[in-house]
Image: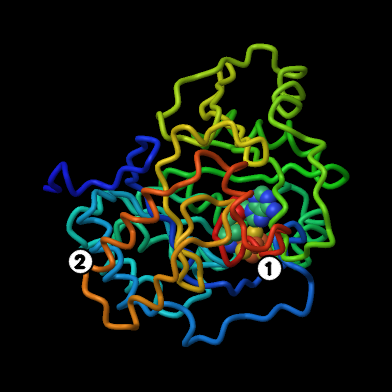
Amino acid sequence: MVKTEDILIDNWGRKINYLRIAITDRCNLRCFYCMPEEGINYLPKKELLSYEELLRLARIVAELGVNKIRLTGGEPFIRRDVMSFLSKLNQTSGIDSIHITTNGVFTHKYLNDLQGVGIKSVNLSMDTLDPVKFKQITRRDEFHNVEKTLYGLLERNIPTKVNMVVMEGQNIDDIVPMVELSKNHPVEVRFIEEMPFNGDALHHVALTWNHKRILQTIQNVYPETNSIAHDSNSTSLRYHIDGFKGNFGIIPAYSRTFCNTCNRLRITSQGTIKTCLYDDGVLDLKKSLRNGDSDQVIKNQLRTVVGKRARDGFEAEKTRKILTINESMSSIGG
Ligand code: SAM
Ligand code: SF4
């Protein structure tokens, strides 16, 4: 039981109970909105936090009231021995729920074991239902594997969310068919506004598809769309269509309308803590972990950065040392 005075609460009164870990920056896809096609400088492996370091971090944050962890990347299933890491992570006292975000290319191989290692839900990224468009967007011909993962998850009743980044000129025709996935399956389909983290500061994102436009497009076809409750820390505006088994959500990731209830910390693949997706790193945690700093020192450092947290994503963006966003989402984890 975490003592009340130990719980991480930021300077705006928001309780932090969720850590997102980018366990690698490597990926087997090259989604154009996330990574450039070539010329990617992956981190040398020794620069990634080791599993032992991540388990220590998990234990430390659990002692500060974090009870939810998501593994992301890059592609988590690219990293060697991820399942045995998950199994150890699952034994961390205080961590009640572990989740994973994946592109689904390799994931189907692990489905039988996922629940055994404590995974509570899977977020599967799938930007289209068309194999040809999939190859254009991800620059790899892997749709069949992602589809295999999707249906494998559903067959096993593993709680599943499908994430689709909505992009002008790419997958707009997929919005309605994607919602229709939730007609016969108890899946939550989530539409994400495109953000500028594509690893290429020259490719600017103009937000042509914001959350309102996405919703309108769906309501034009399904007027019987109703807003439904979402958990208070959710980034997603949630909806249900009468008669459908599942739901859909819209994530205003660029409009940033959800910041006032944000409960999350991120650790990048470089081992840097971010208190907001839009800051460029507020604490070099890898340095502390490798310096031999005690748990207490690390807790104090976390408390300090959480105590100086930007109010929202717009304020966080202004605090950046390098104002132009040129990181790839693959090092941040989404
Ligand atoms: N490789 C895994 C995957 O694709 O699910 C996990 C890492 S990926 C960076 C995590 C999430 O970030 C994915 O759902 C992906 O669609 C989303 N993402 C990546 N780049 C984005 C961008 N520029 N704008 C919005 N979402 C993005
Ligand atoms: Fe890889 Fe995920 Fe980025 Fe696509 S979104 S390139 S699958 S890390």
As rendered, which of 230 and 204 lies closer to the eye? Answer: 204
Question: Is 102 situated left or right of 265 in this image?
Answer: right
Q: In which quarter of the image is residue 220?
A: top right
Percent of width and height locating residue 270: 51, 73
Taking the image in four quarters, ligand 1 sits in the one at: bottom right
Q: Is the CB of mark 1 within 8 Å of ligand 2?
A: yes
**Residue identified by numbered label 1:** 29
Element carrying mark 2: helix
Q: Which of marks 2 and 1 is in front?
A: 2
| Rendered residue at 23%/63% (across/down) | 59
Question: Is residue 110 positioned above or below 231 on the image?
Answer: below
Question: Is residue 65 positioned above or below 182 on the image?
Answer: below
Q: Which of marks 2 and 1 is nearer the N terminus?
A: 1
Three-letter code for the amino acid on which mark 2 is drawn: Gln
Neighbor class of circle 2 (other Cα within 10 Å; few <14, some 14-19, many 20+) is few
Q: Quadrant of residue 31?
A: bottom right
| Rendered residue at 57%/48% (across/down) | 316
How many numbered marks does the figure carry?
Answer: 2
Question: Is residue 174 positioned above or below 133 on the image?
Answer: above
The circle on residue 242 is: none
Question: Is 107 situated left or right of 19 in this image?
Answer: right
As rendered, which of 142 and 200 lies closer to the eye? Answer: 200
**Residue identified by numbered label 2:** 296
Three-letter code for the amino acid on which mark 1 is drawn: Leu
